Image: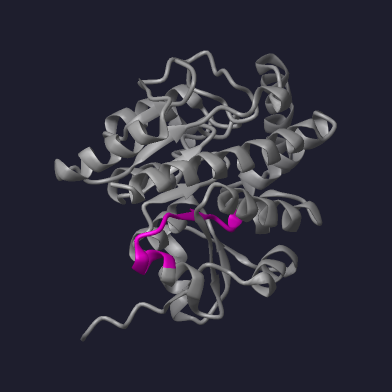
Amino acid sequence: MPAPALPIVLAPEVADALAAGRPVVALESTIVAHGLPRPSNLEVARQAEAAVRAEGAVPATIAVMDGRLRVGLDAGGLVRLATAGGLAKLSRADLGACLAAGGSGATTVAATMIAAAAAGIAVFATGGIGGVHRGAETSFDISADLEELARTPVCVVASGAKAILDLPKTLERLETLGVPVIAVGQDGFPAFWSRESGLPAPLRLDDPVAIAAAFRMRRALGIAGGQLVANPVPAAAALPRREVEAAVDVALAAAAAGGIAGKAVTPFLLDEVRRVTGGRSLAANVALVLDNARLAARIAAAMART
């Protein structure tokens, strides 16, 4: 039986930019549909696209809409993404099934990487990647994002892994998978809302041109996968590491007491940390998302020039 045609739809602006070799930056949709509260989620989605444009690149927010993998959303698509209820949270395991069934959903880091690579987009900006969850030695809860970084050739710009995770184990898993982890502007691995995790970053590159060159060289060597660019949250919006750790402990206890599991864990924990910090974690989240979009656009521009 022949494989079905991939139901991928590129926005005209994205298609034109790719055809002309101009820089394009992929943006995920789960952060809009599931990661940020309404109505700020729509405003942040618009601001992220504007941040990419301000650096001379074209934004391509990715989502599944009515059985189509849409790479680049128009204004109405962004509104639907931010306001519609019941959108699935799609990763590698369920992306194909949702498309085949004609469904709609927001793409996680892993699913966005798959879509970006299929469209020919090499750079992707997000907030923080998933990773090894705390207690994974008994739950085996490890995000598909890590395996995707090891197999799909996309340069992912994020503020490290989400601080609700087991960061030492996440870094160990990335090392085992052969994923380059590149800190920007500092030697330490950032911890999402905090600039420091207390862990050294395996690599450091401060120049978008050097980051682009490292990505191209990895591809020239024939090594599968992408790279993680760990860009710390801007200092003005960062939360102290100890405050974040205390808030995460409270959130984890609440999740355990409520029997929260599976895909519901991350949005629940993010919401709890937001509550415990009086909304300061949300402000940090917004700041890092926009800063990552700007850096990703600079990296994409460097790739387009060579």
Task: Tell me which corner region of the image, top left, top right, bottom left or bottom right, holds residue 253.
Answer: top right
Task: Tell me which corner region of the image, top left, top right, bottom left or bottom right, holds residue 128.
Answer: top right
**Left or right of residue 188: residue 53:** right
Rendering coords of residue 153 (x, y %):
30, 50
**Left or right of residue 261: residue 304:** left
Q: Residue at x 34, y 39 (%)?
A: 212
Q: Which residues are magenta?
A: 17-30
* Residue 153 covered by magenta stretch: no
Q: Residue at x 35, y 59 (%)?
A: 117
Task: Tell me which corner region of the image, top left, top right, bottom left or bottom right, holds residue 234.
Answer: top right
Rendering coords of residue 221 (x, y %):
14, 41
**Left or right of residue 208: residue 240:** right
Give whichever of 302, 108 is nearer the camera.
302
**Left or right of residue 225: residue 14:** right
Q: Residue at x 72, y 32 (%)?
A: 251
Give whichever of 257, 216 is nearer the camera.
216
Q: Considering the image in quadrants, where does the N terminus appear?
A: bottom left
Q: Is residue 11 visible?
A: no
Give whichever of 79, 147 is nearer the camera.
79
Q: Is residue 295 visible?
A: yes
Vertical relation: 241 (above or below) 27? above
